[in-house]
Amino acid sequence: MDFSQMNAAEQAHMSKVIEKSRCKISCACTRTSKALSSKEEQCVMNCTDKFLKHSERVGARFAEHNADAMNAAMSK
């Protein structure tokens, strides 16, 4: 999926939806019913939280790298 045509809010929303889906697949072990068990639900919440924290960290590092690149370009 190409996120380049989306604004930042849409990109964030799509990333969250994709990650929730990925987490749901990795956490939902038993398919005896459509509903998630409390254990599966907690797994999805933990997985999603972990992904969002990782995304925030990646964004922060990208911003740091971008600022360093801008400073280097301005000092030339």
Image: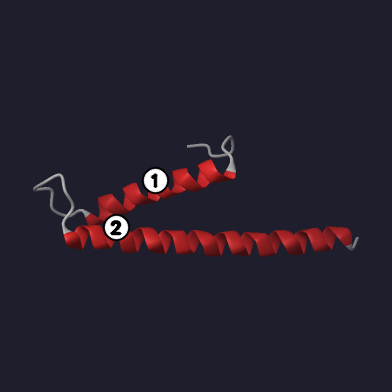
Residue at 18% x, 60% y is: 38
Residue 62 place in picture, x, y as percent = 63, 59
- Report the side of 39 relative to 44 (left or right): left
Mark 1–mark 2 contact, CB under 8 Å? no
Amino acid type shown at disc 1: Val
Residue at 38% x, 51% y is: 19
Q: Which mark is residue 44?
A: 2
Question: Where, by quadrant of the figure, is residue 46 drawn?
Answer: bottom left
Residue at 20% x, 53% y is: 28
Task: In this rendered view, identify the residue nearer to me: 34 or 31.
Answer: 34
Task: In this rendered view, identify the residue nearer to me: 76 or 11.
Answer: 11
Give neighbour class at mark 1: few <14, some 14-19, many 20+ (Cα, 10 Å): few
**Secondary structure at numbered mark 1:** helix
Task: In this rendered view, identify the residue nearer to me: 75 or 38.
Answer: 38
Which residue is outermost to the top? Answer: 5
Q: Which residue is mark 1?
A: 17
Residue 24 place in picture, x, y as percent = 27, 51
Residue 64 place in picture, x, y as percent = 68, 65
Question: Where, by quadrant of the figure, is residue 8 drawn?
Answer: top right
Residue at 39% x, 46% y is: 18
